[in-house]
Image: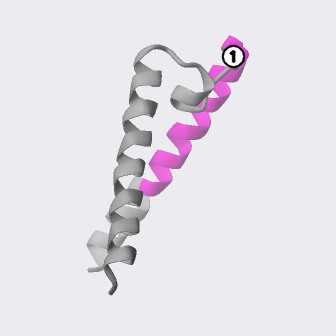
Amino acid sequence: MSKAVAAIRAEIVKKQAEVEALKKALAALGGGAAAGGRGNRKPRTEAQRRKISAALKKAWAERKKAEKKAAAAG
């Protein structure tokens, strides 16, 4: 590999690290959508939260059941 290619790759790694540091700084300052991707969400109603909670509990129960079944079989 030539020195030029190695230098370019090293520069890419440095710039990526710099971008990550800037993202963390923005998140620490409460940078909105760029900070966590959640940006300008509307608040959920109680009914929506209950529905989501029930769906998650059902999914977790199914996963736990499948894990137990796999453990018993294996």
Rendered residue at 45%/14% (across/down): 29
What SS does tag 1 mark?
loop
Residue 61's place in the image compared with 11, above or below, is above
Drawn side of residue 18 relative to residue 43, left or right: left
Drawn side of residue 64 relative to residue 47, left or right: left
Residue 41 figure quarter? top right
Drawn side of residue 42 relative to residue 66, left or right: right
Residue 4 figure quarter? bottom left
Q: Percent position (x, y) of residue 8?
A: 40, 67
Which SS does the magenta portion mostly show?
Answer: helix
Residue 52 figure quarter? top right
Count of numbered marks = 1
Considering depth in this image, is 41 or 33 the residue closer to the camera?
A: 33
Rendered residue at 63%/21% (across/down): 49
Magenta residues span 42-63
> Mark 1 is on which residue type?
Arg
Q: Percent position (x, y) of residue 72?
A: 28, 72
Considering depth in this image, is 48 or 19 the residue closer to the camera?
A: 19
Rendered residue at 41%/59% (across/down): 12
Rendered residue at 49%/14% (across/down): 30
